[in-house]
């Protein structure tokens, strides 16, 4: 049973940077698509970024050019480097991992990112 443990986040500054980390609690012998969703109060859940087993990435238009997602396959870890932060980046960020068998999605516990306006 896999748990996704998130770290990072907290209080950022406009124009500043934060880095989020998500690590599977047990070693993974296959790499699956992982990424981050975020949700702000009163807003729709938004897919921020994802990265496939072959390290192909995609980003939402709102973060493209500012955020970078990477992964360490050996450590079963995905990182989200968030640069040029804006107030609208404030949200709870949830790491996820899609597993094809069983059509299962694992979720991290969520971490709050706050960027004052």
Image (cartoon, rainbow, N blue to C red):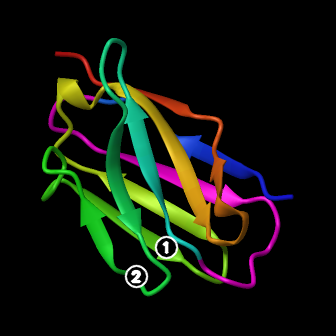
Residue 36 magenta-drawn? no
Q: Measuring 69% from the left and 52% from the top, which residue is drawn there? A: 4
In this rendering, the answer to whether 62 lies above or below 59 is above
Q: Quadrant of residue 65?
A: bottom left
In this rendering, the answer to whether 18 lies above or below 56 is above
Horizontal side, residue 3 vs residue 8: left or right: right
Determine which of the numbered discs, if any, sits on residue 71 in the image.
Answer: 1
What residue is disc 2 on?
55
Tell me if I can see residue 10 in this picture.
no
Pinpoint residue 75: horizontal percent, then vertical percent.
Answer: 67, 75
Residue farthest right in this picture: 1
In this rendering, the answer to whether 69 lies above or below 32 is above
Residue farthest front in this picture: 102
Count of residue discs: 2
Pinpoint residue 86: horizontal percent, then vertical percent.
Answer: 17, 31
Please tell me which residue lies in front, 19 or 38.
38
Magenta range is: 13-31
Q: Measuring 56% from the left and 52% from the top, which residue is drawn there? A: 96
Please tell me how crowded label 2 is: few (under 14), some (14-19), or many (20+) other residues with Cα within 10 Å. some
Residue farthest top in this picture: 42
Q: Which of marks 1 and 2 is in front?
A: 2
Q: Measuring 39% from the left and 36% from the top, which residue is drawn there? A: 38
């Amino acid at each position: 049973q896999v748990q996704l443990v998130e770290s990072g986040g907290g209080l950022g500054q406009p124009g500043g940077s934060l880095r989020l980390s998500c690590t599977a609690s047990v070693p993974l012998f296959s790499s699956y698509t992982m990424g981050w969703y975020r949700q702000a109060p009163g807003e729709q859940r938004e897919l921020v970024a994802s990265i496939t087993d072959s390290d192909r990435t995609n980003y939402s238009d709102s973060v493209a050019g500012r955020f970078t997602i990477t992964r360490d396959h050996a450590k079963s870890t995905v990182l989200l480097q968030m640069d040029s932060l804006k107030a609208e980046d404030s949200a709870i960020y949830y790491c996820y991992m899609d597993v094809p068998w069983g059509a299962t999605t694992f979720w991290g516990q969520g971490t709050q990112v706050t960027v004052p306006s």
